[in-house]
Amino acid sequence: MPGDVLNIDGRIACGDELPVGARELEAWPAEARLERINTSNEVLLRALVAMDALPATHGDDHERHGEDFQRLEARVGLLLNLVARLVEAQQALPDALPVVYNSRGMQLQLPVSIEAGSQVAVDLYLSGLYPTPLQLFGVVDACEPDASAWRVSLFFHGMTTAMRSELDKLVFRRHRRQVARQREKH
């Protein structure tokens, strides 16, 4: 999956090997619970988008402030890294698996088959520095054998517009970074 031309539902997608867990659901979460999960996901995505942002370059007037900001940002990054390592030691993350995702859906390789039409919950860990999962819900569109695993395609369900927008921003930045890395290799 990583390295392929990536799109889902005709939109740019991002591919990587990330810790991810999926399970079948008997029913969708209650509306109030889904609202809390979406709010938590929006906060997580805003933080990840901010952490993924490339530092802006300014003219001479802002250089001193920019350097101060970069030092502060490095310290915060170090603290986040230390906290993430402590949290990671306390909780076992799921195995990293090949995934392709955008705000419409995802493809992932799982060790077990999940029947098309099934409702699923997915915990997707998008950052090693912030070991909190993005909690997603979806409907399995297809499940096909792929080597020693199953390639599962699903479309998301119950995602707010704000959450979809933040995920689009993150996917765009990460996709752009992947394309830049591929160009550097050639």
Image: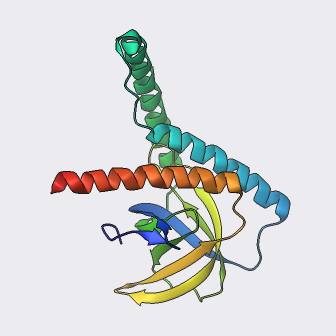
On the rendered structure, is 137 left or right of 128? right
Q: Tell whether 171 sits left or right of 31.
A: left
Q: Spot the residue most to the front.
A: 59
Kindly give the residue lying farthest to the left in the view shown: 186
Q: Quadrant of residue 85?
A: top left
Nearest the viewer among 154 and 161 is 161
* Image coords of residue 65 (percent x, y): 43, 13
Total count of labels: 0
Please provide percent x and percent y for residue 166.
59, 50
Residue in the image at 40% along x and 17% along y: 66
* Drawn side of residue 79 relative to residue 22, left or right: left
The part of the image, by quadrant, that contains residue 137 is: bottom right
Q: Which residue is drawn at the image coordinates 49% and 65% (left, top)?
A: 101
Q: Is residue 86 visible?
A: no
User: Which residue corresponds to the image point at 47% horizontal and 73% vertical from the top-left?
Assistant: 108
Quadrant in the picture for the N terminus: bottom left
Colour setup of the view: rainbow
Q: Is residue 155 visible?
A: yes
- Quadrant of the rendered image containing residue 23: bottom right
Residue in the foreground of this view, choosing between 34 and 130: 34
Residue 64, horizontal then vertical, whole percent: 38, 10
Please state the horizontal and vertical placement of residue 4, each as a whole percent of the image. Answer: 32, 71
Q: Is residue 52 above or below residue 16?
A: above
Q: Quadrant of the C terminus?
A: bottom left
Residue placed most toward the observer, 143 or 131: 143
